[in-house]
Amino acid sequence: MSAAVVVMGIGIALVLALLGATLALAVFRIVRGPTILDRMIGSDMVLTTVLVVIAAAMVIRRDLTAVPVLVVIAATSVFATIAVARAVTPSSDPSDDGTDVTTPERSER
């Protein structure tokens, strides 16, 4: 076994450990909350970590067959973020008092 293979194995193990820690912290943010925006940030981090893991596997294998999967996951993440942002953002309509929005920030009033 050559030294390059050992270094590559150590590098892959280190990257996987860091990505695992990132995933654990993102899941903690989703569970802990307390607001919908905190949970959305955690969800974005989970999806981004999954994207990085799939991309890293593609680099290691030198195979591009998972590119459509990356595109679908990225699009899902973007659309989910936009949907949550639109749901949380107050309306610009003057007749809308915003009382129908149910977020923890609104429930304190």
Image (cartoon, rainbow, N blue to C red):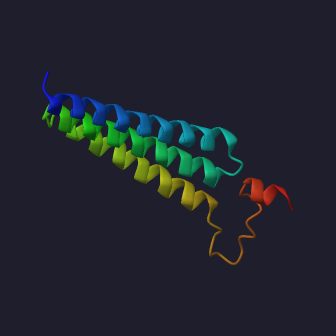
Q: Is residue 77 above or below residue 94?
A: above
Which of 47/75 is in front? 47
Give the residue displayed 54% in from the left and 51% down from the top. 41
Q: Residue furthest right?
A: 109
Which of 49/92 is in front? 49
Q: Residue furthest bottom?
A: 94
Which of 96/58 is in front? 58
Q: Residue furthest front?
A: 3
Quadrant of res 63: top left
Q: Residue furthest top?
A: 1
Question: How far across and down, in percent of the image, does residue 108 sit?
Answer: 85, 58
Q: Is residue 4 left or right of residue 78?
A: left
Question: How far across and down, in percent of the image, does residue 15 sit?
Answer: 35, 38
Q: How many marks?
A: 0
Give the residue displayed 48% in from the left and 49% down from the top. 80
Which image quarter is the C terminus in?
A: bottom right
Quadrant of res 69: top left
Question: How far across and down, in percent of the image, does residue 10 sit?
Answer: 30, 32
Q: Is residue 17 above or below residue 33?
A: above
Give the residue displayed 62% in from the left and 65% down from the top. 89
Give the residue displayed 34% in from the left and 42% down from the top. 51
Question: How far across and down, in percent of the image, does residue 47 sit?
Answer: 43, 42
Which image quarter is the N terminus in?
A: top left
